[in-house]
Amino acid sequence: MANKESYPNLNSPELNRWEDTGVFILAGGKGTRLKESEDLELQLKPKALVHIDSEKGSLPMLDNAISGVFELGFSAITLLTSSDPEAQGELIESHVNQRYQGAFGSIREDQPLGTAGAVFNAFINVEIKTAAIIPADTLFPFNLLPAAIDCHRSRNACITWVVTTMPGENAQNSGRILVNPKNGQIAYGLEGNLHVDINTLLDGYTLSTSVGVVIADREFYIELFQAFKGEENGVGTIDLYRHFIPWLLSQGVQVNTFDIGQPAPDLGTPDRLKQFGRKS
């Protein structure tokens, strides 16, 4: 594993390029599956601070994501952490404050909300028109994020789920999203619903896999999330991919997609971390 650590230049002249678009980085996961490893680092550290080997050297997963969005010119970045003690949100925030010296904000939920609830909470507190929602534990090709946002805007979409038709090996929930190739919209979102036989639903749709990135407009998200909460009072913590977006589809809401056409592996298990996140 490399020893060199490299962090983004916070004085980049590209900052503020995206005036009405911000980034929410999801960093509230407990890392339950990683903690099952015999590796002491994976047992003790919050998932977002586990080191991976990147082109910039050895970095925590979170810093790899932060570096990726800073280099694109985003300055309105908000870190979303969890109040669950197992997620170690305070430790993550301390790392960010020390490393980036207040360059961007963080919001820690006051009770477990789930990814969808955390995004709603962020939209309530952050005045931006559009947000790119990015998980900290995925090797996303950040050079494609501007194209995904441009696609979202050009189609006048309210919400876009970034997917891949080439997930590579060991991808989580591979092929569980069915996209209408005529309009690029989701026909069925089966993320997490592994009991459904996808072969009975194909009928000309394109098999796609989530890469975890979602682009959403603030007013739309706030209004529809409040409607969801009113209708689904017993849900509790609300997952963005397994609860909220499938509910949108059930209501006839058009959910756009953008296909990156390459793998973007998540590193949420020891096997995937070893296979994709660590070269040695």
Image (cartoon, helix red, strand yellow):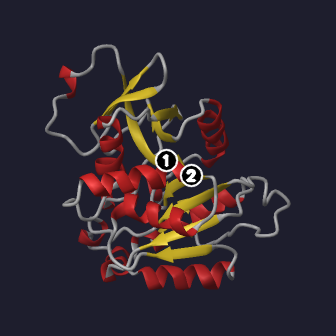
Q: From the viewer's side, name the closer residue of 151 and 99.
A: 151
* Residue type marked 2: Ala
Query: In this picture, is 260 found above or below 234?
Result: above
Where disc 2 sits, the SS reads strand
Q: Residue at x 62, y 41 (%)?
A: 149
Q: Quadrant of residue 197?
A: top left
Q: Is residue 101 toward the left or the right of residue 36 in the image?
A: right
Residue 192 x, y percent position in the rendering: 24, 46
Residue 133 seen from this side: yes
User: Mark number for residue 132?
Assistant: 2
Residue 243 x, y percent position in the rendering: 29, 50
- Check if mark 2's residue and mark 1's residue have beta carbons within 8 Å: yes
Seen as rendered, the residue at the extreme right is 13
Q: From the viewer's side, name the closer residue of 160 and 143.
A: 160
Q: Residue at x 35, y 41 (%)?
A: 248
User: Mark number for residue 214?
Assistant: 1
* Residue type marked 1: Val
